[in-house]
Amino acid sequence: MRHAPVTALDVVEDFTATGRCDEGFLHVRRLRVRNLRADGSHSAVYRVDVIDRPRLDAVAVLVWRRGADGLEFLTRQNLRPAAWFRHDKVPTVPDGRSHLFCEEIVAGLLEDHDSGEAGLRQRAAAEVYEEAGFEVDAANLELLGPPFFVAPGILSEKIFLLVVDVTALTPRAAPGDGSPLEEGGALAWRTQSSLQAALADGTIQDAKTELALSRFLARGR
């Protein structure tokens, strides 16, 4: 079912004051800790907030193909509420953008049954089909180096980067997951120079996309 374009988010309820911090899409642990030292002494007690997802880690996939003008990379416009709600704040350096949608590569959370490197590849293949419509063999997905923390000061999540070549494949209509967050998600192919320029000038402000492209190009393929 097609909908009119999404132009804003309507806050139906803000239940911050009454919601539990250990339920929902993000779990927040509010701790008092102290540093233990090798000599048996310790620091003063201080507060630490740790944010966990119900599923600990995620995969992100750089989908590429060989086009008429060289390498092309698939990106997707995703509805991103947290980025959009920056409009309620006063940024240090305003950029004049709403950030309702963010352009990035295919990504998704790992499930409890995804285990080991085989589980990473299976989840990545599932996300490529769900978000982009390409049916890829999980064995053809390659890891792009080690996983990385997004914001290790507060967020426990690591992202595993993978890459897959879909040059010889024809996509189907991407089925999606039925979430309202997928409304307005538009796919696009960018040439290498276009993607690099979009990252350089801030058109794309997604760290996993930049890191995936950088690691891929560094391999010299």
Image (cartoon, rainbow, N blue to C red):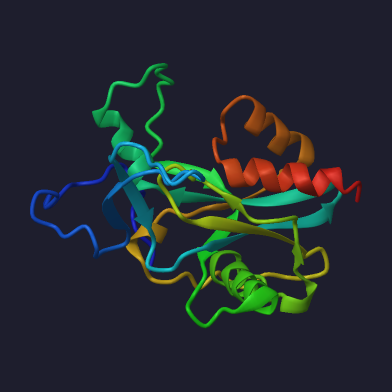
The picture places residue 187, in percent across and down from the top left corner, at 58, 54
State which quadrant residue 130 falls in: bottom right
The picture places residue 79, in percent across and down from the top left corner, at 40, 50
Q: Residue at x 38, y 17 (%)?
A: 92
| Residue furthest out toward the top | 93
Residue 186, relative to residue 178: is it above or below? above
Q: Residue at x 63, y 45 (%)?
A: 209
- Tell whether 108 sits left or right of 74: left
- Tell whether 6 sits left or right of 37: left
- Tell whether 186 sits left or right of 62: left
| Residue furthest out toward the bottom | 113
The picture places residue 68, in percent across and down from the top left corner, at 86, 49
| Residue 115 shows in this picture | yes
State which quadrant residue 137 falls in: bottom right
| Residue 137 shows in this picture | no
Residue 188, relative to residue 108: is it above or below? above
Residue 141, relative to residue 147: is it above or below? below
Nearest to the observer: residue 157 or residue 29? 29
Residue 134, relative to residue 73: is it above or below? below
| Residue furthest out toward the front | 39
The picture places residue 156, in percent across and down from the top left corner, at 45, 55
| Residue furthest out toward the right | 220
Q: Report the quarter where the N terminus lies.
A: bottom left
